[in-house]
Amino acid sequence: MRIQKGIIIVILTLLLSGCWDETQYKDLTIVPLVGIEGEEGDITTMFAFPTFQNGKIEYSSSQGKGVSTRAARSDANHQTMEALDMAHLEVILMSADLAKTDFAPSLDMFFRTPRNRITSYIAIVEGEMGTYFNPPGNLKSEISYYYPELLRTVVLYSFGANFTLQDAMKTMFDPGIDLALPYLRINEETGIPKVVGSGLFSKQRYTGVTLSSSESISAVIMADKLNKYARITFEWEAKNTQITVNVMRVKKKWTIGTDTITASYHLDVAVEEYAPHNLHEKKNREEAAAFLKTSFKEHFDAVIKKSQEAESDILGFGRKVRAFHQELWNKGDWQQTYANIPIQVEVDVRLKLTNIAE
C-alpha cells in the first residue's frame, strides 16, 4: 500500500512540474531582423523588433557592441525592456567589410542555439548598416517585412541559391564548393535597398568580387538550381530589339579531365517577350535559338571568368573532382587549382514555347 502511494505521489509530482526550458513570451522581444558589422573582436550588432505603441505595432531597433555577436546582444539587452530572442529570426544582414574576414564565428550564436531557426536568409550589404535599418527612401512597409519579402523574391526568380543560415554554414566549410550571397546596395535615385547581384566567397571570406543580376541568374542556371522563374533579357542589337526568355529546364554535363573541364548545357526556354512576334516561322525560330545560344554562352563564360578570378567555385566543380578525380583534387588547394584550370563552356538552346506566357 505504501509503495502504491509513493508511486502515485511521484507521478503527480511529475505532472505538476513545468518544462525545464519553458520561456514566457512576456519576458522576450522577438527579433526578425539582425544586422552585423565591424571586425573580428569588435562587433556591432543591430536588432529590429516590434513594439506596441499608440494602439498599433511599430518597429524599433537596438544596438549593441562586443567582442562577438553574443556579447553584442548582451549589451543591447541593457537597452530593451525584455530579452532579445532570435527564435523567429528571418534575415541576417552582414556588412561587406565584416564578410571579408572569417565571419563564421559571428554566425555561431544563431546557428548553434537549439531554439533558433536555421532557415533565416543571409545577405551582404554595402556601406554602413544603420542606413539599411533607416533607409532614406520610402519602403512603404516596415524593414522587418521588406527584407524577408525581398529575399524570398530573390529565391523565386532564381537570382540566387543556397543562402539560408543552414546552407551558408554548410557551404563555407565544404572544400568542394564556395558560397555566393545576395549583395544589397542603396539605390541612389530611390534611396531603397536593392539586390544588385551576388557576392562571391572563397572558403569563409567574401572576395570583394560581385556577379551582376543577370550573371547571378546565369550562375543559378549553370548550377541547375532553378526555382519557379529564371528570366533573362538579352539585347538583340542586330534586330534592334530585346528578347526575354524563361529557362524551363536545364540538362548539364560536366566532363572533367586531368587538366581541363568541359561544362555542357542544354537549355529548354520559353520566349516571354519579343517585339517582332514572328517566331512562328521556322527560319526566325532558328535565328533566335542561335542568338540565344551565343548570348547564354557569353553570360556563362563571364560567370566562369569572375569566379576563377575570385578563386570561388560557386558551381561546385570541386565536389565532383573530389569524388571521382583524386589526381586533380590532390594537386593542391582546390580554390587555387580551380582558378587556373581551363574551363570550356558549351551551350545548346531549344525554344519550347514561343508565345507570350503569363
Image: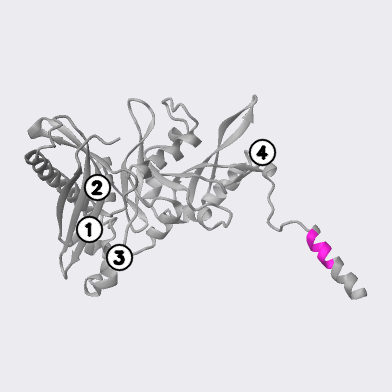
- The amino acid at mark 4 is Met
Q: Nearer the viewer, mark 4 or mark 1?
A: 1
Most common secondary structure along the magenta stretch: helix
Q: Residue at x 34, y 59 (%)?
A: 203
> Which of the image's four quarters has the N terminus?
bottom right
Image mark for residue 81: 4
Left or right: 191, with 255 as reference point: right
Residue at disc 3, secondary structure: helix
Q: Are marks 4 and 1 in contact (CB under 8 Å)?
A: no
Residue at the spot of label 2: 218
The numbered mark, 2 or 1, whose residue comes first in the sequence reads 2
Q: Amino acid at mark 1?
A: Lys
The mark nearer the N terminus, 4 or 1, is: 4
Specify whether residue 330 is in view.
Answer: no
Asked if the residue under mark 1 is in contact with the one under mark 2, i.e. CB atoms within 8 Å, the reply is: no
Disc 1 crowd rating (10 Å Cα; few below 14, some 14-19, many 20+) is some
Specify whether 210 is left or right of 55: left
Q: Is residue 276 magenta?
A: no
| Pointer 3 residue | 319
User: What's drawn in magenta, residue-wise?
Assistant: 10-15
- Vertical comparison of 311 with 152: above or below: below
Residue occupying image coordinates x 22% and y 74%: 327
Q: Secondary structure at mark 1?
A: strand
Q: Where residue 325 sits in the image (x, y, percent)? A: 23, 72
